[in-house]
Image (spheres, rainbow, N blue to C red):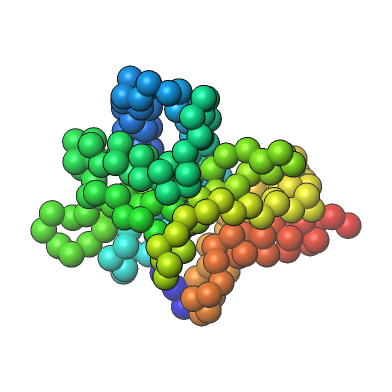
Amino acid sequence: MGNYTYVPKKIYKPTKLKLIALINTVQRYLRHKFTFRVTFDFRFVGSSRRNMITMNPKSNVGYDFDLDLRIYARKKVLTPSEYKHMLMDAFNKFVHEYGYDYCEDNARVFTIKHKDEIKPKIIHSCDFAIVRDCDDGRLEYIRHHREHNTYFWEKQSIYPAELTKQVKFCKYYNLWNKVRSLYIKLKNENTDPNVKSRSIYSQTVNQIYLKNIS
């Protein structure tokens, strides 16, 4: 059994505002740094977007945010490696001002962490995925193949239409508190480390939907 709990809004909201301030600083820097036009916007995704951020108080990894950084470029097109390192270098110029360590380059994202200055503990972290629009209307993200140290664009999975319908149903019929209660219950009952939170979320919404649809 796990020990996950929801992070109270009064705890994560100041952190969220600090992250937005950091991102805005990087946006301004990139606008003035390069002669060719590179801009990006951002959005919180996953549990950050749903306001369902969780943490295990007994662990040392804290809670986390997930964001998409959507790239827009004019005139000059960079390689996936150039885009990712350009953004990580830009963030690295300012992360210490906001209390974060330097960026870590991971397979799907780059990550910044705010650590406890005394204990070996991560208070919170943030994963940034670099994405862009595809011709077919989908998004693709920069993936880092660590074994070969290569970077390439890979299409993101399509958000299931059925799940979207079920989420709307649960919200329309005021079932979201039940979704939250069941989600944290299933997350704590899960013993398979390979099961991602998004899978538990989909399972949760589906169960509440099926229980109340008839």
In this view of the protein, can residue 10 be seen by the observer? Answer: no
Vertically, is 6 above or below 189? above
For image coordinates 88% across by 57% down, the residue present is: 214
Looking at the picture, how far across and down is residue 113, in whole percent?
A: 28, 52
Looking at the picture, how far across and down is residue 23, in whole percent?
A: 36, 33
| Viewer-closest of 58 and 15 | 15
| Viewer-closest of 6 and 27 | 27
Q: Quadrant of residue 25?
A: top left
In this view of the protein, can residue 58 be seen by the observer? Answer: yes
Looking at the picture, how far across and down is residue 208, in whole percent?
A: 72, 59
**In the image, 118: left or right of 132?**
left
**In the image, 53: left or right of 155?**
left
**In the image, 162: left or right of 125?**
right
For image coordinates 63% across by 52% down, the residue present is: 155
For image coordinates 48% across by 47% down, the residue present is: 80
**In the image, 36: left or right of 133?**
left
Q: Residue furthest left?
A: 118
Q: Quadrant of residue 203?
A: bottom right
Q: Quadrant of residue 117?
A: bottom left
Looking at the picture, how far across and down is residue 11, in whole percent?
A: 34, 44
